[in-house]
Amino acid sequence: MRIYKVGGAVRDRLLGKPVTDIDWVVVGATTEEMLAKGFRPVGADFPVFLHPKSGEEYALARTERKSGRGYGGFTFHASPEVTLEEDLIRRDLTINAMAEDDQQNLTDPYHGQRDLEARLLRHVSPAFAEDPLRVLRVARFAARYAALDFSVAAETLELMRQLSESGELEALTPERSWKEISRALMEDQPQVFVEVLRACGALKVLMPEVDALFGVPQPPAHHPEIDTGTHTLSVLQQAALHKQPLTVRWACLLHDLGKGLTPEDEWPRHIAHEFKGLKLIKAVNERFKVPRDCQELALLVGEYHTHGHRALELKPSTLLELLQSFDVYRRPQRFEEFIAACEMDARGRKGLEQRSYPQADYLRGAATAARSVAVQPLLEKGFKGPELGEAIKRERLKALKAYKETASI
Ligand code: CTP
């Protein structure tokens, strides 16, 4: 039995990046031998085991062949005769298809090291096409290594284009797609993920609502970059630069979907795009079974981001409605995330990246003012039920009027 480190651990060590997860491949062993050594089997799908002490994954070397659509459609063959080279050739990228023994001797039959040096994301073999999720994986790696100047090899992009056109992407489960999307959004350059998906035609399949934003103009006075797709990418980039959480990044990606629905004769204006976009945001949320907090924030940011920008001009009654919509009294964090998304939207415009955003503090101050209304005195005055609700609202409105008069921004 011979054991090798494979995949990301080898790649990241050669790149000088920290290695978090280590995957191992075992050549020349049977399931019975692994069990006898105390390894615990995981999952029914593949011959993968957990190390009894470290808990790391050890997989028997295997070959795979596609036998149907989607991820389930695989037959695999694992036996002590399967060689390391045979195991490596079924993998996605050359930089992920290197192995290393305990002396750090590299096995690199598909020239991963050469591609690392050339900064190329290149598929190992036509077997790449056997798992359509790899289209998203390559886009995610492109986002992760963009700062190191990596790009996708032309022939790999072509294969990704063929896969996107073949209808195979539709066979991906929402869970697998979302895992890739959410990881990609948390990379330092998430906009590259979207760009690569667009370049190979996968964006049109996965998120046609985002793809439709490219080529849609906005008024140059507010949007010097003009194009709505370009703007969306910049907003996402700002969100990453400002280390925003996933909820905010997801909301940034979807905030302007309504602009893709504007009739051309209304361009470059986008009247009521906030409302028009809601059904599209909902559709994307549902398509990928997006976690509830991300879904909610995306819908709220979609509906209210222009309120955020006009915060200083809003009437106290509109400000109150905004705060109520966010349930800012019980969900203060969600309102903070809304403010962050609005700020990223304001900065994600050509030449305006460094602008200040006084609306942020103004909105925080408004939330504090509304929250400062005490309920106890109203209870003592005898208000109950719906009347109490109305009385609280009146007091909050008073507090917001006073705030608007005194706030000095
Ligand atoms: N792999 C693959 N095709 C996939 C998923 C994984 O070929 N759809 C192979 C690659 O060789 C990859 C290895 O399995 O390097 C381990 O996969 P995973 O842990 O998902 O990714 P890593 O490459 O380790 O990258 P990350 O740092 O993103 O975890």
Image: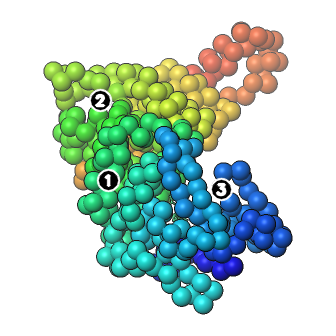
Which amino acid, mark 1?
Answer: Leu
Residue identifier under label 3: 46
Residue identifier under label 1: 159
Chosen colour scheme: rainbow
Residue in view at x 61 percent, y 78 percent: 4
| Among the two numbered marks 2 and 3 on one chain, the one whose residue lies closer to the N terminus | 3
**In the image, which is nearer the foreground, mark 3 or mark 1?**
3
Which amino acid, mark 3?
Answer: Phe
Image quarter where the N terminus lies is bottom right
Residue in view at x 50 percent, y 84 percent: 106
Q: Residues within 10 Å of mark 3 (few under 14, many from 20)?
A: some
**In the image, which is nearer the foreground, mark 1 or mark 2?**
1
Q: What is the distance, in whole Å, between disc 2 and disc 3 at their CAs? A: 43 Å
The local secondary structure at tag 3 comes to loop
Q: What is the distance, in whole Å, between disc 1 and disc 2 at their CAs? A: 28 Å
Residue in view at x 22 percent, y 34 percent: 216
Q: Position of residue 139 (x, y in %)?
A: 39, 55
* Residue positioned most to the front: 81
Residue identifier under label 2: 260
Residue 112's place in the image compared with 245, above or below, is below
Q: Nearer the viewer, residue 83 or 408?
A: 83
Drawn side of residue 46 relative to residue 379, left or right: left
Which amino acid, mark 2?
Answer: Gly
Q: What is the distance, in whole Å, between disc 3 and disc 1 at their CAs? A: 26 Å
**In the image, which is nearer the foreground, mark 2 or mark 3?**
3
Question: From where the camera sits, is residue 362 visible?
Answer: no
Residue 39's place in the image compared with 66, above or below, is below
Q: Are marks 2 and 3 in contact (CB under 8 Å)?
A: no
Task: Residue 104: give its label.
Answer: none
